[in-house]
């Protein structure tokens, strides 16, 4: 069983590749969280996976909240792994996730990072990659996933995450500030370029965007995945002045319920 969260599609693509390689079912975390009880029955030889993007050098809050609520019936120390997608580096994501799992009595046996195209655009100096770098990252991700699938199939106990420089500062100092001050949806708005296509509404993983009188309105349940911004064909979705003249990225294999 593979639990995953994704906004713009990088982690969704990874989860799909792992599901095929391991013959394990996929569970979309936002959909599962709609249920009061998060109980999942495990088989004796089942693998347990968590797939998610890096948000400010740590797992997204929605993933940690899911782990805190999850109940795995018939858990007998089955092989458990995680795979995270990152634009550059992961910080101390491994330590954060392993602790969250340990707090639930779950043992993590392996963890991996996969470098994927950047999509965070809400701070000065942050933008999407060039098209050439995007192409290179997507191409390199294919053999990386082949390698990871092989390691998981052999149930290898190994951690291979690219922490990068200053991981403590990034994860322990910057990430809490990000979660406190950068997760608000209140600065989202739609310009007059909006064509009421509903793509932003349909792509939101937590159903936080609704069209009212032909224009999107954002609720309070935002994960800051930026899918609504990146999917807009007119680039009408903006976040204050922070997204002005910024690029867009959407994984080419991302499925949208049109």
Image (spheres, rainbow, N blue to C red):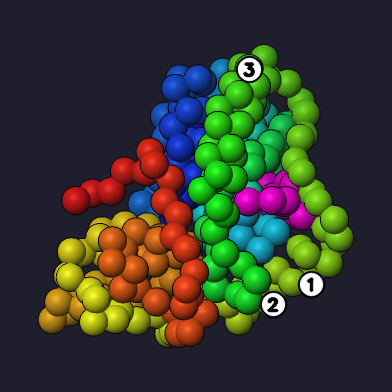
The residue lying toward the viewer, choosing from 208 and 79, is 208
- 145 lies above or below 218: above
Q: Residue 165 carries which label?
A: none
Q: How far apart are marks 3 and 1 (CA)?
A: 35 Å
Magenta region: 87-103
**Which residue is painted at 73% across and 31% down in the image?**
109
> Which residue is denoted by mark 3 in the rendering?
150
Upstream in sequence: badge 3 or badge 1 = 3
Crowding near the residue tagged with mark 2, few <14, some 14–19, many ≥20 C-alpha atoms within 10 Å: few
Q: Is the magenta stretch mostly helix, strand or loop?
A: helix
Crowding near the residue tagged with mark 3, few <14, some 14–19, many ≥20 C-alpha atoms within 10 Å: some
Inspect the magenta stretch and tell me whether residue 237 lies in it: no
Q: Is residue 184 left or right of residue 156?
A: left
> Which residue is denoted by mark 2 in the rendering?
177
- 169 lies above or below 11: below
Q: What element carries label 2?
A: helix
Residue 73 visible in the snapshot: no
């Amino acid at each position: 069983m593979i639990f995953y969260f994704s906004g713009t599609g990088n982690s969704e693509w990874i989860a799909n590749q792992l599901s095929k390689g391991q013959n394990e079912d996929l569970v979309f975390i936002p959909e599962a969280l709609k249920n009061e009880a998060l109980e999942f029955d495990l088989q004796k030889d089942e693998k347990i996976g968590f797939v998610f993007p890096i948000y400010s050098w740590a797992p997204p809050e929605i993933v940690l909240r899911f782990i805190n609520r999850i109940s795995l019936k018939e858990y007998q120390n089955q092989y458990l792994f995680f795979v995270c997608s990152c634009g550059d580096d992961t910080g101390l994501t491994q330590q954060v996730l392993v602790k969250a799992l340990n707090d639930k009595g779950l043992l993590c046996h392996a963890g991996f990072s996969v470098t994927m195209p950047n999509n965070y655009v809400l701070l000065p100096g942050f933008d999407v990659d060039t098209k050439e770098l995007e192409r290179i990252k997507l191409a390199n991700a294919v053999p990386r996933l082949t390698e990871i699938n092989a390691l998981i199939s052999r149930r290898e106990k190994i951690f291979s995450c690219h922490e990068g420089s200053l991981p403590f500062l990034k994860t322990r100092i910057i990430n809490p500030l990000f979660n406190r001050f950068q997760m608000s949806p209140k600065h989202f708005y739609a310009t007059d370029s909006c064509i009421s296509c509903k793509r932003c509404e349909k792509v939101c993983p937590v159903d936080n965007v609704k069209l009212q009188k032909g224009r999107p309105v954002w609720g309070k349940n935002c994960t800051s995945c930026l899918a609504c911004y990146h999917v807009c064909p007119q680039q009408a979705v903006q976040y204050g002045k922070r997204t002005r003249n910024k690029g867009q990225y959407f994984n080419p294999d991302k499925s949208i319920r049109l």
